[in-house]
Amino acid sequence: MTKILQPFALLFISIFLIACNSTSSEKSNNAKACNVGSVRITADFEVGRMDKCQRVADNEYLITLIPENTPINPSPWYAFKIAADQPTDIKIIMKVKGDKHRYLPKLKQAGKPWVLQKHRLNNGRLTMKLTASSKASYIAGQEIINNNYYTKWAKKLTAQTTDGGRVTHDLLGQSTQGRPVYKLESKSESKEWLVILGRMHPPEVTGALALFPFVENLLANTTLANKFREKYNILVIPNINPDGVAAGNWRHNANGLDLNRDWIKFSQIETKQINDYLQNLVAKGDKIKFAVDFHSTLEDVFYTMPTDYGVEQPYFVKHWLSALDKSMPNFTVVIKPGNTPNNGVSKQYFSDNFKVHAITYEVGDNTGRQKIIDIANNAATTLMTTLLSNDDHSQE
């Protein structure tokens, strides 16, 4: 049975429909088309990806997914469009070169929500049957969030804020291929900063689906959020790897490198310009207070720094996540502390450079979409409450 994905933010739905109905000027270099007969399977749009497509029988197609380079984390991404001159039943088989599938196929038809596409996975081959028609439909590993979506989301969010222009959406810098990397900021008279990062790894869409409501809650016109923004500045860089997003990469940037392993060397412009910006804030007398980096994995989990690592307020994160756990009786917060000083991950970078806590907020690939929103909203609320409290976070 086809399963309807739980609804997520209406803003996302409306902007996605606009994005799918427009032709992007930035095409993926990986797009290979099956334009055989009256059926067309293409990936010539931003985030589109199917590295090889073959017609193997009448109305039967074999799609092969190939990573941008190796070695690489096993996160095969795919996104393609299907259309036909007349209603046609087709069969699609997908295989991954040298790896295995991670993402279950989702279907988007005109005027309808994303649904989980019925499929069969056997011996590394994912098989699905569907009807192609003159109205194009999309198949993707997750809901499609392209680069343009982030810009529209941020602009709409800044237009809705009531802080009298204190919330801004500006250019931070450019990616390897020259795409804009934007920052969203809320500034007050404070010198302390909460930093929020997202989309280092292009297919990790559920992390983005959590980042959006999390940030919206922080910037909302509520008593709690207004009080929080008086005490803390907020820096959000929601889409760090726009080149990888545009190309439909499995994990890497345009240079074939994992950005969440580059927070020591800063060999890539995407991480270097963030580090430069943060170091400049500190040089002017500001302080990084805390950082949250949104990602996706197989389950919902919070990767934290150990309480004995030597950061200030060592029990702050534990107190925050305990409050989140108590606020959601039907959700268990999973905390995995870790110290990986030579891996070049962002949370280690913040702790080593600024002596503060940072976490990797991992969202499950298949977590219900409404559940993602609920957790993110509660996480933002309890974070604000914890940071505003007078509790002693130096002890358990």
Image (spheres, rainbow, N blue to C red):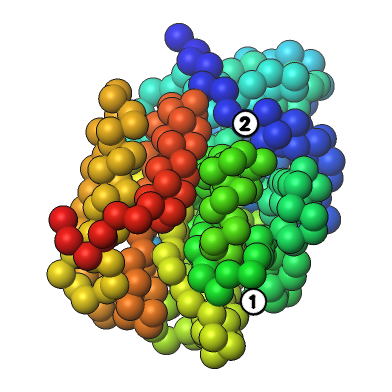
Q: Residue furthest front?
A: 390
Question: Residue 354, how many percent across, how many down?
Answer: 39, 79
- Tag of residue 176: 1
* Left or right: residue 362 compared with residue 174: left
Q: Residues within 10 Å of mark 1 (few under 14, many from 20)?
A: some
Question: Residue 71, how many percent across, how many down?
Answer: 36, 67
Label 2: which residue? 9
Badge nearest the viewer, 1 or 2: 2
Disc 1 residue type? Thr
Quadrant in the picture for the N terminus: top left
Question: Residue 87, how many percent across, how many down?
Answer: 73, 13
**Residue in the image at 33% along x and 29% along y:** 328
Image quadrant where residue 10 sits:
top right
Q: CA distance from mark 1 to mark 2?
A: 31 Å
**Residue in the image at 21% along x and 76% along y:** 310
* Left or right: residue 175 compared with residue 14: left
58 versus 21 height, above or below = above
Quadrant in the picture for the C terminus: bottom left
- SS category of the residue bearing label 1: loop
93 versus 43 height, above or below = above
Nearest the camera: 174 or 102? 174
